[in-house]
Image (spheres, rainbow, N blue to C red):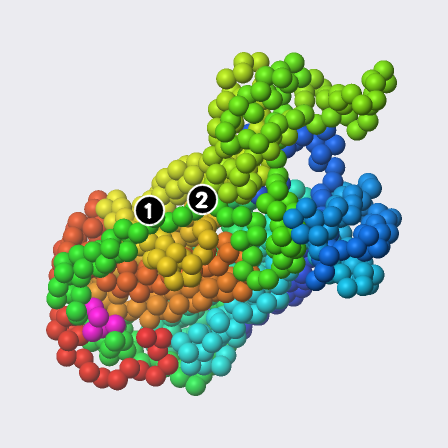
């Protein structure tokens, strides 16, 4: 029977219609969803509870303390100061101001004060209780507006305290929707224009990234609104960055393969299909690695760490979907014109290019391949030694946490107000007692045990607000009892956010645990810091091996090998350690930072291993493809030559997008931005360029054991399309200029 062939014109119309339909679905469907990006703030949870350790002693103590009417309000402290001693008239006017503040709906009980300064008479304070049912950020904003509209003559008013810090933290995340996204997109656009030297392609890639961001924003909004995920400001910032960076990386890989196929095929639809087939495996493996690695964060006990995983995993899935559906459709519609003014032309009909042709198109990477081929052992030993030298400093990375005043990188009112408060009242102005919840019958033992410690200045139970019936006025008020429990406030000798206070809480817990039957739980600021530190260390020990196992299981079916995945993982772990070591030197000796949040090492590890392995995946999946037809040696070197430009561009793009996190004025995000950006560049420029190819050449075909590629040998296969001299010789003598428009 004679095979029936569809007329070319009809096939072209079908392709145009399909590509147009896919593009319209994205533009008209995901495009309007971008409105949800501006609504994510409505479902954010930036209160302290969103960052507490899940199930930790301090968290349980805080929940029990709410029964004692301590959790119904968040105090805001209004600090009043002048360049002179405050008079009785000033204090009377401050009292009238307190009454006006107390009339606000969010001030759920009487404002306390004015309280004159004990150390400096030019300072006084008001304690404003803000109800927890009200939005803290909005309430503090209204309080500050009231103070600005109703000032006291010659007196400056600043809002600090727990509510003030919480409001300034929310404000620090306020620029995510605009500034962060603009900086990231502009950085990517500049890089893409330099890479493609084309006005249209960068626009297509950016549109694909923005559509992915719109889709992910809508999905995250829906998930957070229904309680499936918890969203906070830091998760939203990382979501924006990772979606743009990941989608651009996948787009770079697809476009580079599409350019190759346009040179090999006459018809655009066939080139698009071939390009999609060629990159589907690497992109699915890459995206799957990132998604599964991020979902490993669900095993964490720290609430902020656990919530990050599913939020960002949704974004990476949207990035993959956009890069693999919208972008191919857009490229099919634009055809070769997408690369204007340096559009590639069909130059041959045979399958595959010769090595000589490849080297003419990639002279720079051909020379690098030749250098690696001449002395592979020297290159991988040298790069390994360099990474180890940097990794030596990694154990010195200080991730013991910082005080709340130190997390801001710009001047904020809460920090300035706290400094004024300390000037007026001394160190005790910032005292936050440890809170001990215990059984009522053991009150005396708990107080005595706490006061026996050298780091404790005193301990006393929370008492009834007034003398109960039958109690003689003047007697000590009775302890407040809730469900058979009492609450004891333990005043520590050290600043509550200092390492000494954390050590004091550790000692307090050890002492109280010896009281059998008391069931004492220790909470408060210092206890939360201790639990956060210990939980973050526990999370690192649990999540890191889990991520390594997941990455290994993803790489095995992709590369059909057991040896190659182990080598790739070892290289990327060493790269992470090197980035952490360099970060130690930069943070401590260059920037002079006060320390790091305990979760910084874990976040950096997850992102660097999950994202850094991408470049090794892109390289080694192409190396395996080439090895099956050309032999191991030429396959590895050819893969390095062909993918060099696109992987380097992808690394620079991802590093630039993560660096954009530094625009958010918080210490945690500055450190994460540096570690991930620097680590990605190390992976893309050093590990993928020199270490992995050189090590692969030195190991030989055994790299692919037990897969079929392990039996190819080092020489070209008999059916290889290459009829050129050996790659190393050709590369060493190639001097032709780089072809215009190539992303080398």
Mark pair 2, 1: CA separation: 13 Å
Give the dominant element type of the magenta stretch: helix, strand or loop: helix
Instruction: Name the residue: 57% across, 62% down.
Output: 410
Left or right of 97, for residue 136: left
- Whichever of labels 2 and 1 marks the residue nearer the N terminus, that label is 1
Specify the quadrant that holds the N terminus: bottom left
| Image coordinates for residue 704, horizontal then vertical, percent | 22, 50
**Residue 501 appearing in the image:** yes
Dot label at residue 191: none
Dot label at residue 400: 2
Secondary structure found at label 2: loop
* Mark 1 surroundings: few (<14), some (14-19) or many (≥20) residues within 10 A: few
**Pointer 1 residue:** 395
Residue 151 sits in quarter:
bottom right
Left or right of 570, for residue 291: right
Instruction: Name the residue: 77% across, 25% down.
Output: 464
Tell me the magenta residue range: 365-369
């Amino acid at each position: 029977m004679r095979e029936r062939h569809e007329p070319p014109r009809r096939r072209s119309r079908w392709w145009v219609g399909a590509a147009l339909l896919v593009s319209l679905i994205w533009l008209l469907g995901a495009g309007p969803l971008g409105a949800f990006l501006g609504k994510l703030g409505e479902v954010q949870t930036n209160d302290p509870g969103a960052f507490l350790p899940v199930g930790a002693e301090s968290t349980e103590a805080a929940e029990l303390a709410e029964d004692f009417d301590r959790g119904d309000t968040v105090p805001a402290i209004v600090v009043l100061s002048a360049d002179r001693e405050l008079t009785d008239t000033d204090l009377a006017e401050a009292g009238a101001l307190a009454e006006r503040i107390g009339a606000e709906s969010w001030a759920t009980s009487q404002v306390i004060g004015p309280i004159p300064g004990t150390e400096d008479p030019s300072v006084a304070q008001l304690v404003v209780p803000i109800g927890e049912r009200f939005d803290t950020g909005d309430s503090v904003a209204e309080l500050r507006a009231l103070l600005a509209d109703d000032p006291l003559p010659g007196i400056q008013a600043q809002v600090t305290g727990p509510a003030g810090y919480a409001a300034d933290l929310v404000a620090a995340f306020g620029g995510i929707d605009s500034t962060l996204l603009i900086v990231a997109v502009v950085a990517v656009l500049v890089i893409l224009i330099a890479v493609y030297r084309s006005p249209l392609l960068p626009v297509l890639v950016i549109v694909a990234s923005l559509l992915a961001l719109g889709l992910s924003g809508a999905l995250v909004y829906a998930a957070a609104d229904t309680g499936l995920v918890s969203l906070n400001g830091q998760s939203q910032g990382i979501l924006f960055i990772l979606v743009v960076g990941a989608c651009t990386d996948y787009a770079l890989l697809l476009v580079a393969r599409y350019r190759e196929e346009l040179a090999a095929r006459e018809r655009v639809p066939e080139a698009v299909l071939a390009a999609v087939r060629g990159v589907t495996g690497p992109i699915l493996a890459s995206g799957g690695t990132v998604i599964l690695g991020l979902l490993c964060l669900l095993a964490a006990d720290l609430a902020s760490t656990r919530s990050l995983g599913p939020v960002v995993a949704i974004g990476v899935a949207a990035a993959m979907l956009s890069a693999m559906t919208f972008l191919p459709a857009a490229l099919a519609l634009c055809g070769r014109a997408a690369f204007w003014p340096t559009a590639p032309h069909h130059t041959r009909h045979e399958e595959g290019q010769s090595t000589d042709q490849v080297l003419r198109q990639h002279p720079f990477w051909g020379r690098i391949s030749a250098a690696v081929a001449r002395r592979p052992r020297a290159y991988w030993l040298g790069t390994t030694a360099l990474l180890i030298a940097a990794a030596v400093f990694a154990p010195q990375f200080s991730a013991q946490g910082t005080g709340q005043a130190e997390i801001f990188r710009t001047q904020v009112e809460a920090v300035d107000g706290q400094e004024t408060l300390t000037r007026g009242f001394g160190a005790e102005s910032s005292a936050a007692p440890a809170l001990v919840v215990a059984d009522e019958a053991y009150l005396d033992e708990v107080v005595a045990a706490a006061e026996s410690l050298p780091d404790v200045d005193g301990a006393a139970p929370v008492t009834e607000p007034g003398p109960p019936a039958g109690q003689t006025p003047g007697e000590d008020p009775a302890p407040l009892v809730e469900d058979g429990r009492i609450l004891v406030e333990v005043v520590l000798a050290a600043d509550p956010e200092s390492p000494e206070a954390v050590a004091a809480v550790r000692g307090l817990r050890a002492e109280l645990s010896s009281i059998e039957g008391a069931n004492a739980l220790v909470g408060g600021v210092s206890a939360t810091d201790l639990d956060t530190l210990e939980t973050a260390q526990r999370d690192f020990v649990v999540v890191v091996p889990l991520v390594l196992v997941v990455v290994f299981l993803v790489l095995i079916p992709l590369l059909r090998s057991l040896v190659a995945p182990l080598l790739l993982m070892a290289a990327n772990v060493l790269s992470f350690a090197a980035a952490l070591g360099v970060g130690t030197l930069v943070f401590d000796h260059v920037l002079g930072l006060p320390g790091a949040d305990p979760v910084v090492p874990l976040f950096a590890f997850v992102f660097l291993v999950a994202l850094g392995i991408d470049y090794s995946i892109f390289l080694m999946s192409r190396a395996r493809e080439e090895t099956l037809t050309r032999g191991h040696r030429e396959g590895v070197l050819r893969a390095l030559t062909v993918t060099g430009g696109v992987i380097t561009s992808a690394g620079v793009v991802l590093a630039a997008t993560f660096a954009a996190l530094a625009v958010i004025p918080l210490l945690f995000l500055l450190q994460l931005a540096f570690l991930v950006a620097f680590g990605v560049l190390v992976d893309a420029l050093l590990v993928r360029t020199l270490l992995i190819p050189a090590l692969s050449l030195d190991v030989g075909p055994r790299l692919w054991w037990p897969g079929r590629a392990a039996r190819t040998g080092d020489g070209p296969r008999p059916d290889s399309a290459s009829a050129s001299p050996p790659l190393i010789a050709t590369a060493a003598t190639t001097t032709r200029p780089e072809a215009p428009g190539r992303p080398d």
